Amino acid sequence: MIPPSTLSAFGPGKVILLGEHGVVYGYPALAAPLSIGVTATALLRAGSEEASVEVPAELRGPGRRLLVEAFDAAVRVSGAGGLRMTLDSELPPSMGLGSSAAVAVACAGALLKSRGRSAPPTVEEIARVAWEMEKVFHGTPSGIDHTTSARNQLIHFRRAADGDPSKAQVTPVTVKRPFGLVVALVGERPSTKETVAALRARQARWPERYARVFEQIGTLVEEGRGAIERGELELLGDVMDMNQGLLNALGLSSAGIEEMVHRLRAAGALGAKLTGAGGDGGAVIGLFEEADRVVTRLRRAGIKCFASRIGEAAR
Ligand code: MEV
């Protein structure tokens, strides 16, 4: 008997550098891939049409059902079959670091590869299948998370008016001077879906005032992009700080997030802000020329964090 063969695909996690939430309303955002992420491994079963996913034991509550539902949607759109998928994640879940998008991109890559075509799947094909999973996980996300993960590069992203991520304006951003981020974990947070929905309710009640803030965030995104392209890290830090102030104004920060932002600034960050949906927990990023030594110091003080380098060759 020929032994069953396996194949695998990787999906990186992501950080939003600038512009989260505004991006849902059509304003631009900047996001970068992390070097850590999710690996999906497919055990191929010749002679079977069935495709299933092994739900990780640590996944609790509705997340278990959602993963199966999302995976089934990806199987349908990819046309794959005859496999059992396992997942191996290096990402802390539900921290705003794109773990669901990384799962989606890794599964999409492995499902498409399993169809045994001679050419590897394209970024667009992977993104299309991953999007089916993201919709199950998040409802109506902007699409920035799985697009960043599928492209595995720092991007400037603007959602299309009809929300179709294959029509989004996506431009790679050149990083003149690579930089370090400290990614510090604040703690559990509500789901992205809930935080986005709560903001949507406030925005629907007072649309003009909220539009003014989104507009300001969009302007900061363009300034931040220029700073990255010119290697002006102090300017980028200042833009990040201001973006944090506006996220706070939108009701997306919390005591824990603010404390971590101030802690990173006190540790020498050029700028610090929440990343992802925020709400009441999640992750905070701090901008440093060199983040490794800061991480060692912060860990000694009991802070859960890791370093990520932006602008260097992707994994
Ligand atoms: C989540 O990583 C980013 C948000 O802007 C939601 C989205 O873009 O779908 C909060």
Image: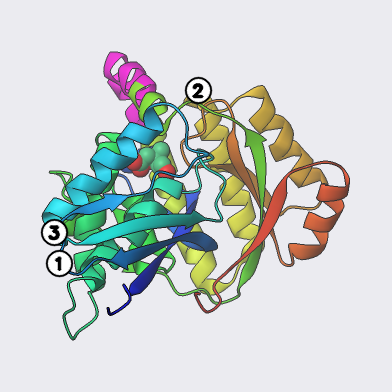
Q: Measured from the top left, where is residue 33 in percent x and y? A: 47, 62
Residue carrying label 2: 251
Residue plotted at (39% across, 64% down): 41
Residue at label 3? Answer: 49
Amino acid carrying label 3: it is: Glu
Instruction: Nearest to the eye among marks 2 and 3: give it.
Output: 3
For the stretch drawn in magenta, what is the main secondary structure?
A: helix
Horizontal placement of 48 versus 228: left or right? left
Dot 1 corresponds to which residue?
A: 47
Chain part drawn in magenta? 198-212
Q: Secondary structure at mark 1?
A: loop
Can you give x and y, in whole percent of width and height, for residue 267 in the image? 82, 49
Report the Cα–Cα distance between label 1 and label 3: 7 Å
The N terminus lies in quadrant: bottom left
**At label 1, which amino acid type do we have?**
Gly
| 94 and 240: which is toward the camera | 94
